[in-house]
Amino acid sequence: MAALYNLQLELNMKKKILYTTPNFNTAGSGKVVLDLIRGLKNEFEVEVACFHDRGALFEIVKAEGVKIHLFNFTEPGKPYLTLFSRIRRIVTFFKENKFDIIHSWHYTDDWTEALAARLAGVPYVFTKKSMSWGGKDWKLRSALSSRIITINTDMNREFYPKQRKAIYIPLGLDVQEYQPQPRDFRILADTGIAEKNFVMLSVANLVPIKGIETAIEAMALCKNDNIHYVIVGSYDEAYFARLKGLVSDFGLEKNVHFLGKKTD
């Protein structure tokens, strides 16, 4: 009877999910994790681990009532000789909290978190968010993972051909929150863009992997002054200078608009 009672308790217990993300500084991955928390917290015991409590979304996540661990869940991979002693604290953290699954939203090729999860005996899943690849670190992280979530089919074809553990799950939008709105050109008043113009928009932190230069080169090929390109996001100084130079070379200064980082 005692064994049957314990089995019933185990079946009735909510599975415990840990979401890991470096921070909630921006509304990119942080917003996705927030939406996952909201969607799953009634069916699962959801907890979060992040490096610090700064960022525009942190207080919103905190208000959801889930447990938040301010914990650095990674270590430098090298030197290899001291790696296992250095990640012992991460292994202990995963074990002591008795997580059933870890879902990582860390954007880099860090593999130490995955190794710690493996040593702790906890299934580890990560979402591959960008097209960055190359070197052994991404391959190590992938090999140590129980499952890999890809957000486009190019990732499956280029990075994980014939790997069954790479599962394609496209990003989605809550249509109750994000609904079509009338075009409002007041926010672009300083750009010279008119309502009759065709406007492209990129919202991204500007780093070379984003490929913004491809869109600029395409605009130059079109040779159409009616096309405007609005770019919103913080930028790496060197890459930004390169993009500005490209815009100048093509004579697109009146058509390409860098608005910088916006919180809304």
Image: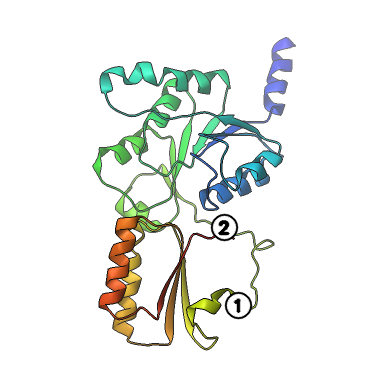
| Quadrant of the image occupied by residue 74 | top left
Q: Which mark is residue 49?
A: none
Residue 90 in the image: above or below residue 179: above
SS label for mark 2:
loop
Query: Is residue 97 found left or right of 248 in the rendered image?
Result: right
Question: What residue is rendered at 37% in x and 88% in y?
Answer: 224
- Residue nearest the observer in this picture, 57 or 164: 57
Mark 1 crowd level (few <14, some 14–19, many ≥20, 10 Å Cα): few
Residue 229 in the image: above or below residue 29: below
Query: Is residue 155 found left or right of 170 in the rendered image?
Result: left
Quadrant for the N terminus in the image: top right
Question: What residue is rendered at 36% in x and 16% in y?
Answer: 85
Instruction: Indicate the position of residue 104 as horizontal and vertical percent values.
Output: 48, 38
How is the model colour-coded?
A: rainbow
Instruction: Indicate the position of residue 186 as horizontal and vertical percent values.
Output: 60, 77
- Residue nearest the observer in this picture, 207 or 44: 207
Question: What residue is rendered at 35% in x and 44% in y?
Answer: 163
Quadrant for the C terminus in the image: bottom right
Q: Earlier in the sequence, mark 1 or mark 2?
A: 1
Residue 223 in the image: above or below residue 11: below
Q: Circles 1 and 2: CB distance less than 8 Å?
A: no
The residue lying furthest to the top in this view is 2
What amino acid type should be assigned to the residue bearing mark 1?
Arg
Mark 2 crowd level (few <14, some 14–19, many ≥20, 10 Å Cα): few
Q: CA distance from mark 1 to mark 2?
A: 17 Å
Say whether residue 34 is visible: yes
SS label for mark 1:
helix
Task: Tell me the residue that label 1 is attached to.
Answer: 186
Instruction: Indicate the position of residue 151 as horizontal and vertical percent values.
Output: 45, 54
What amino acid type should be assigned to the residue bearing mark 2?
Thr
Q: Which mark is residue 263?
A: 2
Instruction: Indicate the position of residue 24 as horizontal and vertical percent values.
Output: 55, 44
